[in-house]
Image (cartoon, rainbow, N blue to C red):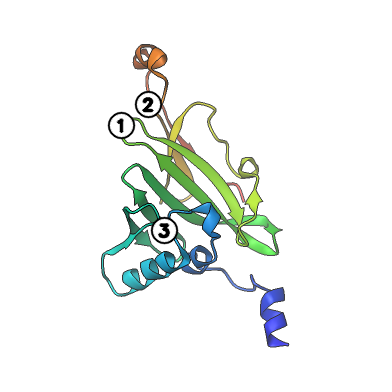
Amino acid sequence: MAVLMVTAFPCAAQQKMRDVFLRMPDELLPYLTENNRLDFIDFMDSGMKAVVNNELGGKSEMLSLSDESLTIQVSPAMRMSMRLFPVSEAVDSCQQVVCVITTYGTDAPESRVESYSLAWNPVDVSKHLSIPNEPYIADFMEVPGVGLVFRQSDALDQLAHEEQKKESSWLRNVEWNP
């Protein structure tokens, strides 16, 4: 009966990022195996540099891990950050969702923002954030009331590059709406 209760009430308490990350399906980040994710957490807990060999033969490094967030340099051209945010309406019986920012590229990076339930089912991010239509670079903010910051990306095609130089860059702070 205790097993049934744990399964039926997975969100009785606030979840920690380490637990959510360990439950992440391999297909959402095929670079890393479940063992890689376990190694990251073990290395971070031991105060060691958290570097693993990824599935593409390169190195991936966990740069930070807290109860609410984590950041991984998956490859030289890909960084993934995750953060737990509260929601006012339960999603998969939980009052939290995980917001994932994946940034691709080195010279002209561009980000993608997605959100998932703690069971890793996709959640419509537009319910909680106003995402720019233009190419952007996103990052989480540690400022109360601000969830994410979006900066203009240089990830435009070559023909638009000259026109882009004429445009002033923008910076947008966006509040997470539970």
> In the image, is residue 163 above or below residue 80?
above
Closer to the camera: disc 3 or disc 1? 1
Q: CA distance from mark 2 to mark 1?
A: 8 Å
Of residue 114 and residue 140, the one placed in the foreground of this image is: 114
Task: Answer left or right for 129 relative to 51.
Answer: right
Provide residue 37's location: percent of width, then percent of height: 43, 65
Give amino acid for label 1.
Answer: Asp
Q: Residues within 10 Å of mark 1 (few under 14, many from 20)?
A: few
Kindly identify the residue that appears in the image at 51 percent across and 69 percent down: 19
Query: Is there CB contact under 8 Å for labels 2 and 1?
Result: yes
Residues at circles 3 and 1 in contact by the CB criterion of under 8 Å: no
Left or right placement of residue 138 versus residue 131 in this view: left
Q: Is residue 73 visible?
A: yes
What residue is shown at x 43% (from left), y 51% (from top)?
Answer: 81
Q: In the image, 8: left or right of 24?
A: right
Q: Are marks 3 and 2 in contact (CB under 8 Å)?
A: no
Q: How far separated are the C-alphas under marks 3 and 2?
A: 25 Å
Count of numbered circles in the view: 3
Q: Amino acid at mark 3?
A: Leu
Residue marked by disc 3: 70
Q: Which residue is mark 2?
A: 154
Q: Earlier in the sequence, mark 2 or mark 1?
A: 1
Question: Residue 73 — which label?
Answer: none
Dot 2 falls on a residue whose secondary structure is: loop
On the rendered image, what quadrant is the N terminus found in? bottom right
The image quadrant of residue 168 is: top left
Q: Report the residue marked by disc 1.
A: 107
Q: Amino acid at mark 2?
A: Asp
